[in-house]
Amino acid sequence: MLLALPFPMIDPVLVQVGPLAIRWYALAYIVGILLGWMLARRTVALAPQVATRQQVDDFVTWATLGVILGGRLGYVLFYRADHYLWHPLEILQVWQGGMSFHGGALGVIVALVLFCRQQRIDILAFGDRITAVVPVGLLLGRIANFINGELWGRVTDAPWGMVFPTGGPEPRHPSQLYQAGMEGLVLLVLLQVLVHRPAIRARRGFVAGAFLAGYGVARFIGEFFRQPDAFLGFLFAGATMGQLLSVPMILAGAWLMLRAKPAAREAAA
């Protein structure tokens, strides 16, 4: 038995009144959406203003549906397609868990494109302002994963390894906290610095590209410490599903950043 830090046993249920239970994970979604919404209302107002605050308020509903529908369908298709093919009714059982960030990201992208077309808003400029606040939800979501004692890391002899309640007797990386730091805090600070620079805001699509590439790199690194899903294990060339799904994000993000040009130069071209 290696030395390990004690896992802080926090009840996954924050408050329960009769059959109604409020879980930390659900609270992370709710608070993440609220904080992201309030921050987005400020970022869209930065010069040049790309949308009204009322339009941001309306987009919250679209984004929420994109996250939930995309996240669930992404998990079904990317992670357990063979299982749900034979148990299709279980797709609706979201309370049993099973959400994919990559699927949720696709869902929000679809929602953003449809919303911008309906409202006649510049897709790239609006996308820059919205993606700049997404890491807020990622940070809270990973912390909730840690509280739930789920999605733990690989076995380690590091002095900060933890024995998770469902992870067996061996110390493991608290990879949820690594991901909270990289995908959440670091990425949030980076994107906020970028979106508050007028020269960067003039390059439509750059911040959105930085989000896609930044998240992809952070997730790719984080997967080296996270235990792969038991029903998938290691895939092509020893990579995990999270790493394979992150590669297209990195490439798409790099493409968006490379093609982003100031509006004046685009008009001249």
Image (cartoon, rainbow, N blue to C red):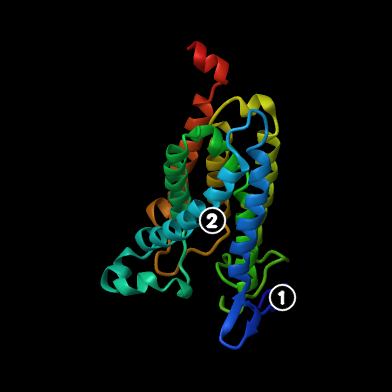
Q: Quadrant of residue 142?
A: bottom right
Disc 2 secondary structure class: loop
Instruction: Tell me the residue at 46%/75% (across/down).
Output: 96
Seen in the picture, residue 149 relative to 179 is either above or below; the reply is below
Neighbour tally class for label 2: few under 14, some 14-19, many 20 plus, Cα within 10 Å: many
Instruction: Tell me the residue at 53%/25% (across/down).
Output: 260
Residue at image mark 2: 223
The residue lying furthest to the front in this view is 54
From the viewer's perspective, is the residue at label 1 or at label 2 nearer? 1
The residue lying furthest to the left in this view is 86
Q: Quadrant of the N terminus?
A: bottom right
Q: Is residue 169 visible?
A: no
Seen in the picture, residue 85 relative to 66 is either above or below; the reply is below
Residue 41 % position (x, y): 65, 44
Residue type, numbered disc 2: Glu
The residue lying furthest to the bottom in this view is 18
Residue at image mark 1: 8
Residue 170 % position (x, y): 61, 75
**Looking at the image, is mark 1 or mark 2 earlier in the sequence?**
1
Report if the CB atoms under discs 1 and 2 are less than 8 Å apart. no
Neighbour tally class for label 1: few under 14, some 14-19, many 20 plus, Cα within 10 Å: few
The residue lying toward the viewer, choosing from 263 and 184, is 263
Disc 1 secondary structure class: loop
Q: Quadrant of residue 140?
A: bottom right
Instruction: Tell me the residue at 63%/46% (across/down).
Output: 133
Instruction: Tell me the residue at 69%/50% (across/down).
Output: 185
Residue type, numbered disc 1: Pro
Left-right relation of 45 to 83: right
Residue 61 % position (x, y): 51, 55
